[in-house]
Amino acid sequence: MRQKENWEFDWQRRWCQLYELPENKARVLEYWIKYRHLEDIQKIVPVDNETYILDVGCGISTVLHYLPGHRYGIDPLIERYKTIYAYPPELTLQAAYGESIPFPDSYFNLVICSNCIDHTLDPAITIAEIHRVLTSGGHFILTCEVFEANLGKRNAAHPYSMNVEKLMDLVSRFNIIASWNSPWIGLQRYILDQPPTEQREQIFLLSK
Ligand SMILES: C[S@@+](CC[C@H](N)C(=O)[O-])C[C@H]1O[C@@H](n2cnc3c(N)ncnc32)[C@H](O)[C@@H]1O
């Protein structure tokens, strides 16, 4: 566990040096719009000052930076991230695992889990927890790298590798509103103007 957490932290520490620059913050939003279809999603899902939003595995460059509403983020490493990054004060951040979300049933209108489900130790329990904390009719945005081959455990931070079928199976208790299969560039590669890699990123907009 220590090795996994150090791997995640070291990655975020390097990433933070880039993300902190205002022009790169703007480019991350650009990435969300271009490859994770944020504007298309917002045409379907109303997000305003009254929306309760949770980002599971929020990391440093959480999409909560770019949304209105009551914004909550959980991440097991949040206290370490706070030592290297000044989050906007309006975000409520808590150290927690997706496998045990510290909020009551039906608390959120929108849950987001981006580039995190294949980092969790138990993706199925994490998805069940997300389902539990969503209101009936609430929405769930899931993004995850997907591979053609089953690569199994990829490195210390990724106990699993996913493909589209595995993800479909994991989210079978939700209704699929929309899905997209985008090139996988990743935030850091995008900012550094590097080309897409061979894998893809699957994006699901789901409802409970
Ligand atoms: C690649 S980062 C993604 C961060 C952010 N969501 C994004 O899209 O930029 C993966 C994050 O998942 C977190 N994480 C790892 N295991 C987790 C778990 N079991 N529950 C919730 N978050 C976890 C890591 O600490 C890390 O911050």
Image (cartoon, rainbow, N blue to C red):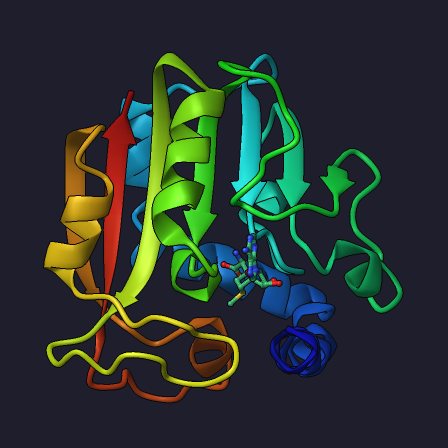
Q: Is residue 4 visible?
A: yes
Q: Indicate the quadrant where residue 93 lies.
A: top right
- Near-viewer residue (100 or 180): 100
Q: In which quadrant of the rendered image does the C terminus lie?
A: top left
Figure quadrant, ligand 1: bottom right
Q: Looking at the picture, how far across and down is residue 101, in whole percent?
A: 59, 35
Q: Indicate the quadrant where residue 181 lies.
A: bottom left
Q: Looking at the picture, how far across and down is residue 1, in whole percent?
A: 64, 73
* Residue drawn at point x = 15 percent, y = 47 percent: 168
Q: Is residue 38 visible?
A: no
Q: Check the image and report above or below for 184 versus 101.
A: below
Q: Looking at the picture, how far across and down is residue 18, in whole percent?
A: 67, 78
- Near-viewer residue (81 or 172): 172
Q: Check the image and report above or below for 61 versus 42.
A: below
Apparent side of residue 198 relative to residue 36 in the rendered image (left or right): left
- Near-viewer residue (9 or 24): 9
Q: Check the image and report above or below for 66 versus 80.
A: above
Find the residue positioned furthest to the right. 83
* Residue drawn at point x = 78 percent, y = 33 percent: 90
* Residue drawn at point x = 21 percent, y = 78 percent: 199
* Residue drawn at point x = 49 percent, y = 86 percent: 192
- Near-viewer residue (168 or 1): 1
Marker count (numbered): 0
Q: Looking at the picture, how far across and down is residue 146, in whole percent?
A: 22, 68
Q: Check the image and report above or below for 192 versus 90.
A: below
